[in-house]
Image (cartoon, rainbow, N blue to C red):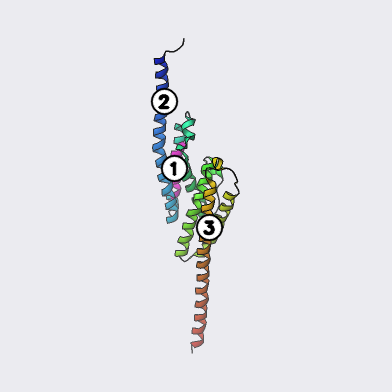
Amino acid sequence: MTPSADELAEEISRHLEEKDQAREEALALTRVVVRRSGAAIRSVHRGELDRALDLADRAGEDLAAILNLLKEHPDVRYSGLVDGAEQEYAEARIVYALITEERIPHPQEVGVEMTSYLAGLGDAVGELRRHILDLIRLGRPEEGEVHLAAMEEIYHLLMSLDYPDAVTKGMRRKGDVARSLLDRTRGDLTNAIGQRRLEAELKEVEERLNLKDTP
């Protein structure tokens, strides 16, 4: 039996109501993921690694809840609604691995869409620069060399992906930003290490002169 217009309207309305409800709940959770991911990155910089890992884990659980909410609504899932949350979460996971383990985590380990992983990887370059500047301020510039190498590795990875922006979602621009950050950080680190070595040499000369003056 062919449904009436009223029956069709009721069925369609019910479907759209479910979709809208799922979207609203997912949207609220994306804000939580972004907030927790950002807090995780800040905790890494403060050296609060247990807290950083806990926040990243909780953000991952929230992200899984979002995907579960939207599993019956792939149009909402892939509308861009989740992209920001996935990118922030990916950045948090990548920054944690880069700074605490000195490695780039595999996309499957992070567990997000590939374009979100790449966006998080590109944004992690800025966090590596921040970490290197912190090391310089602490008088430990030599420790920044391994992180500078990671910045360079990420930059070359991003620039090797020669695909249209429609596929990579603006990865070329992130690569350009990474290049600028890399060049500035290399200069900052080179100057800091050179200054530290000069200070060490001057101190050594001073100590030798003091020894000569000692009766």
Residue at x 39% of width, y 37% of height: 28
Task: Estimate the x, y position of residue 179 in percent, counting from the top left.
Answer: 54, 55
Residue, far bottom: 215
Q: Secondary structure at mark 3?
A: helix
Magenta residue check for 58: yes
Question: Between 183 and 42, which is closer to the camera in this rendering?
Answer: 183
The region drawn magenta spans: 52-64
Expressed as whole percent of the image width and height from the top left, the position of residue 156 reads: 59, 52
Q: Amino acid at mark 3?
A: Leu
Q: Quadrant of residue 4?
A: top left
* Mark toward the start of the polypeptide (2 vs 3): 2
Which one is in front in this view, the residue at disc 3 or the one at disc 1? 3
The dominant secondary structure in magenta is: helix
Identify which amino acid the numbered label 1 is placed on. Ala
Mark whose residue sits in front, 2 or 1: 2
Give whichever of 145, 120 is nearer the camera.
120
Location of mark 1 (residue): 59
Q: Residue at x 44, y 32 (%)?
A: 69
Q: Position of residue 12 (x, y in %)?
A: 42, 21
Local secondary structure at mark 2: helix
In the image: residue 164, left or right of residue 28: right
Distance between the alpha carbons at the discs numbered 2 and 1: 28 Å
Name the residue that disc number 3 marks.
182
Q: CA distance from mark 3 to mark 1?
A: 29 Å
Using the image as rendered, state which of residue 28 and residue 187 is in the foreground. 187
Counting residues from the start of the chain, the first of labels 2 and 1 encountered is: 2
Seen from the viewer's position, the closer of residues 179 and 71 is 179
Q: Which residue is mark 2?
A: 16
